[in-house]
Image (cartoon, grey):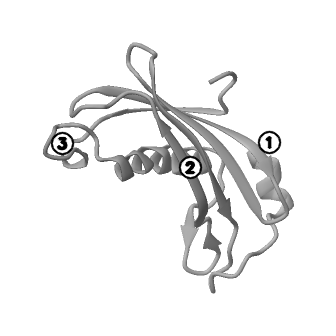
Amino acid sequence: MENPAYRHAGVIAFGDTDASGWVHFPNIFKYVEAAEHAFLRSRGVIVFDRIEGGWPRVKVSCDFTRPLQCGESIETQLVISRIGTTSITWDFEISHADGETAAFGSMTTVRVNSHGRPQEISAAERAALS
């Protein structure tokens, strides 16, 4: 990924694999979410708060290009491809330690209030994410 906004290192956990020893496909999103949350916290943006709300996912897509096994070191890269009035679209890529891409895709999150209703991304949040 060219010019990622954030890089997050990790190791594939045994509990994220299936009987074949490979990462079970929905678990790839755990690594993307961990990177997203680390990025938001690094910018002083809330991840979730019972009073302030949060950023639930409304759309995800992922292409898998190479399997991942338990114990492998990975890097998740994120870039914000679009900031709308209430939503953010993130592009992501997960790579093996050798730099080869294992999965890539995008997800859209919506800024919601404590009742789960969309709310405008504040000027402070927008500035922190830029």
Residue reaching furthest top? Answer: 98
Could you tell me the amino acid type at mark 1? Answer: Ser
What distance separates the C-alpha of mark 2 from that of mark 3? Answer: 24 Å
Q: Position of residue 3 (x, y in %)?
A: 69, 23
Q: Is residue 54 left or right of residue 30?
A: right
Q: Secondary structure at mark 1?
A: loop
Per the image, the residue denoted by label 1 is 130
- Looking at the rendered structure, the kind of residue marked 2 is Ser
- Going by the picture, which residue comes out furthest to the bottom? 115
Question: Closer to the observer: label 3 or label 1?
Answer: 3
> Which one is in front in this view, the residue at disc 2 or the one at disc 3?
2
Q: How many marks?
A: 3
Q: Position of residue 17 (x, y in %)?
A: 22, 44
Residue highlighted by disc 2: 61
Residue 70 sits in which quadrant?
Answer: top left
Task: Name the element at disc 2.
Answer: strand
